[in-house]
């Protein structure tokens, strides 16, 4: 990590470039599943961890190492391990650090598959999963007990855009027991806008599929933490439990996408501000959720823990549900698709899509309303994005 003391803008370009035989400026793709040992003794030493060097790509690969080093410095963590999806990252952390009888306390607003993993799967293995609203610190305090080993949340949250106070939550949990792992899903902010480890969190996970890669063409995840914890996640969660290994070719492409994170995020943020300004003034829109609005839950925390407010927004229209569907179907520039954080603007309906793992009662209980629409604001021309909404609203309302 040669560029530890440089800015993110410089690290994104220069960090992680590894020495290679021909002096390639860009990290080469080591598309190999396995690596040669000079001798039986060398193989044994590598397996024992007595000698550095690669063994087998499920345990490590030079192209992937370069990407890991870049992400670790961006998050200001000691180490990172890549996974083949965001869910692979989350599941690898769970299998590494939880055991039957442990209590996991998680926020009530989570990506749908994370919610499903916690409430439908971990519970089958004897983990005591407790869900509560993290915007009220008392809720967490009430649930902490001697069996608690992990506290998990997103910020901003998917899809209600609530901002959880990373410092307050970490301090509160660690004051109770410093060994509890505070895990933050930093996907919506990206490591450019928010660095949870610097606010007291122990572990950061990402769906790198989103802003980190940025081009809607790869599924990828990562975990960032101390060297010791990442070693455990790599050797237990990834190697032995999930096998969620990133392919070296995908690692190369993610590294390429990541290089432009700073400029992409600046544009996402600038576009989102203008779009939110439009939405809040629109006669068709009832409510807007965006960390930059004073009405957003956790707006004060957003101001202190985020560099800017990001490119994700959710809102509800004043139209009937049928009219809202016509509105979405009438968009021409916006793409109706799940996922987020790519250069193109996407729109989706959480209740029937990304959060369909929640039951109807759970959706209602956790404020994922039937009319909620989530948008990922891309880097296109903002006036053209606004004009597209206007023409679609006109069709939906016959005006
Ligand atoms: C906040 C968040 N975390 C995790 C995931 C899972 O990531 P992946 O789809 O890369 O497995 C997603 C996916 O949408 C997400 O939005």
Image (spheres, rainbow, N blue to C red):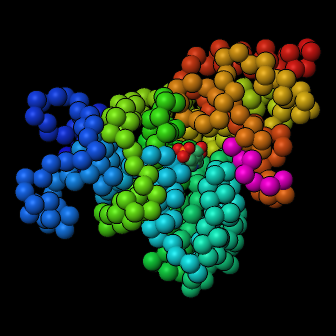
> Can you say whether 222 is above or below 378 in the image?
below
Give the image quarter of residue 274: top right
Where residue 215 appears, x then y in whole percent? Answer: 48, 28
Q: Furthest-front residue in view?
A: 40
Could you tell whether 66 is left or right of 156 in the image? left
Where residue 380 appears, x then y in whole percent? Answer: 56, 19
Please tell me which residue lies in front, 289 or 22: 22
Give the image quarter of residue 105: bottom right
Where residue 64 appears, x then y in whole percent? Answer: 31, 44
> Can you say whether 327 is above or below 46 in the image?
above
Residue 294 visible in the picture: no
Q: Which segment did they paint magenta? A: 354-360
> Can you say whether 315 is above or below 129 in the image?
above
Could you tell whether 320 is left or right of 9 in the image? right
* Magenta span contains residue 153: no
Please tell me which residue lies in front, 319 or 61: 61
Q: Which secondary structure dominates the residues rendered in magenta? A: loop
Could you tell whether 240 is left or right of 329 in the image? left
């Amino acid at each position: 990590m040669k560029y530890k003391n440089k800015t993110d803008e410089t690290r994104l370009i220069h960090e992680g470039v590894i020495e290679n035989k021909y002096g390639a400026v860009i990290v080469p793709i080591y598309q190999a599943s396995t690596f040669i040992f000079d001798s039986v003794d060398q193989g044994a030493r590598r397996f024992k961890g007595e000698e550095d060097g690669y063994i087998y790509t499920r345990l490590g690969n030079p192209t992937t190492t370069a990407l890991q080093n870049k992400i670790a410095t961006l998050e200001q963590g000691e180490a990172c391990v890549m996974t083949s999806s965001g869910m692979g990252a989350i599941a690898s952390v769970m299998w590494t650090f939880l055991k039957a009888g442990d209590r996991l306390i998680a926020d009530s607003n989570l990506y749908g598959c994370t919610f499903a993993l916690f409430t439908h799967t971990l519970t089958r293995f004897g983990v005591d999963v407790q869900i509560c609203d993290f915007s009220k610190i008392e809720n967490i305090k009430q649930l902490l007990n001697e069996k608690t080993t992990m506290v998990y949340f997103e910020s901003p949250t998917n899809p209600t855009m609530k901002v959880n106070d990373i410092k307050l939550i970490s301090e509160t949990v660690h004051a109770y027991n410093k060994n509890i792992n505070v895990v933050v899903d930093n996907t919506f902010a990206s490591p450019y806008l928010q660095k949870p480890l610097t606010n007291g969190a122990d572990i950061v996970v990402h769906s790198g599929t989103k802003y980190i890669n940025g081009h809607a063409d790869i599924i990828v995840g990562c975990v960032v933490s101390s060297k010791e914890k990442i070693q455990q996640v790599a050797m237990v969660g990834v190697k032995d439990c999930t096998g969620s290994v990133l392919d070296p070719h995908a690692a190369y492409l993610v590294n390429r996408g990541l290089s432009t994170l700073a400029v992409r995020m600046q544009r996402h943020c600038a576009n989102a501000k203008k779009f939110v300004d439009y939405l809040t003034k629109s006669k068709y829109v009832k409510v807007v959720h965006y960390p930059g609005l004073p009405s957003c839950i956790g707006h004060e925390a957003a101001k202190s823990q985020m560099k800017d407010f990001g490119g994700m927004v959710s809102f509800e229209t004043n139209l009937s549900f049928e009219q809202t569907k016509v509105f979405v179907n009438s968009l021409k520039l916006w793409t109706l698709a799940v996922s987020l954080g790519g250069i193109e603007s996407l729109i989706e309906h959480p209740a029937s899509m990304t959060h369909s793992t929640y039951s109807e009662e759970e959706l209602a209980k956790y404020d994922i309303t039937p009319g909620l629409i989530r948008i990922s604001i891309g880097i296109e021309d903002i006036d053209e994005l606004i004009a597209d909404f206007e023409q679609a609203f006109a069709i939906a309302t016959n005006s």
